[in-house]
Image (cartoon, grey):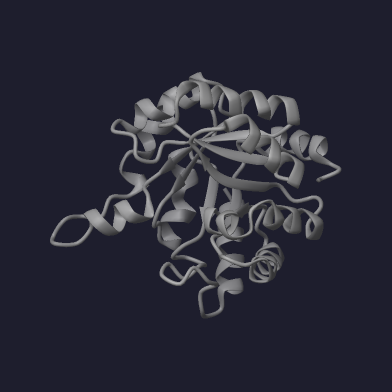
Amino acid sequence: MCGQLTDCGMTEIVIAMTPVVQISLDLTNIPEALETAEMALRAGVDWLEAGTPLIIAEGMHGVRALRQRFPDTPIVADLKTMDGGYLEAELMAEAGATHVVVMARAHEETIKCVVQAGRDFNVKVMGDNLGCPDMVAGAKRLEALGCDYVVHHIGYDERRGIGGAGKPMPSPLDQLSEVVEAVGVPVQAVGGLSIEQAIRTPEYGAPLVVLGAPLTIDPDAFKTAGGDVESSLRLICEKVHAY
C-alpha cells in the first residue's frame, strides 16, 4: 500500500484544476505494464492508470506491483465498478490505488458505497458516464452522488461499432463542453482521441488528459504501440503542462 496516500491526496488538491497527464496501461501483464509506466514517467506523465485489461488479467497484483515500483505516483484503478462497490474500492485502496472508477449506470447505492469507501480509505472516486443515454445527465448524477471527478467516456466498442458505413465516429469531444459546464468537479475526456485532440482537452475545461489506445497502446493487441512512443509522450506532456 502507498505509505503516502495522504500526501498524494494533498498534492492532488493543489493540482486538481491544473492540467494532468495520465497514461492508461491497457495491457495484460505486469512486466510490460511496469516497463511502459517507467517510460511514461520519464516522458513527464503525472498519473498511472491500471487499465481494465490489466486489472482483469492481474487483479490486485497489477496495482500492487505499480505501487511498489512507483511509491509516490497517483494510480487510478479502472475497475468500472457496477456492483459490490465498497469491497472493490477497499481492495484497490489496500493494493495502493489512489483513485477508483465507478460507472454512472450502476445502481445509486453502488455509487454511494464507492464514495463512502473513498472517504474511509482516502481514495478519490472517478465516475464514468460510459453508455449513459444522456451523457450530461449521467455526469451530473455522478457529481450529485459524491464523485470527485467525472470521466466523460465514449467506449471502445461503441466507437468501432457506430463508426464506419458513412457514419461519423462518436467522440467525447462532441459533448465535452456541455459536460464541463454541467458539473463543478474536474472532467476527463476518454475515447479514441488523437494526439492533437488529447492535447486540446484542457481548452474545453477538461484538465485531466488521458492517453491510451490507440495513442500509446496498440488498440487491437493491447500491447505497447510501436514507434518512438516516449518522444511522442514527452511532446504531449510538454504541451499539456504548458496550459
Residue 117 image position (x, y, % from top left): 67, 28
Residue 56 image position (x, y, % from top left): 56, 55
Q: Quadrant of residue 233?
A: bottom right
- For the N terminus, the quadrant is top right
Q: Nearer the viewer, residue 201 or 131?
A: 131
Farthest-out residue, left: 166
Q: Quadrant of residue 182?
A: top left
Residue drawn at x 52%, y 26% is: 110
Residue 118 image position (x, y, % from top left): 67, 29
Residue 232 image position (x, y, % from top left): 55, 70
Position of residue 191 in the picture relative to residue 15 (left or right): left
Can you say whether 118 is above or below 44 in the image?
Answer: above
Position of residue 173 in the picture relative to residue 112 (left or right): left
**Res. 203 visible in picture:** yes
Residue drawn at x 59%, y 53% is: 22
Can you say whether 127 is above or below 225 in the image?
Answer: above
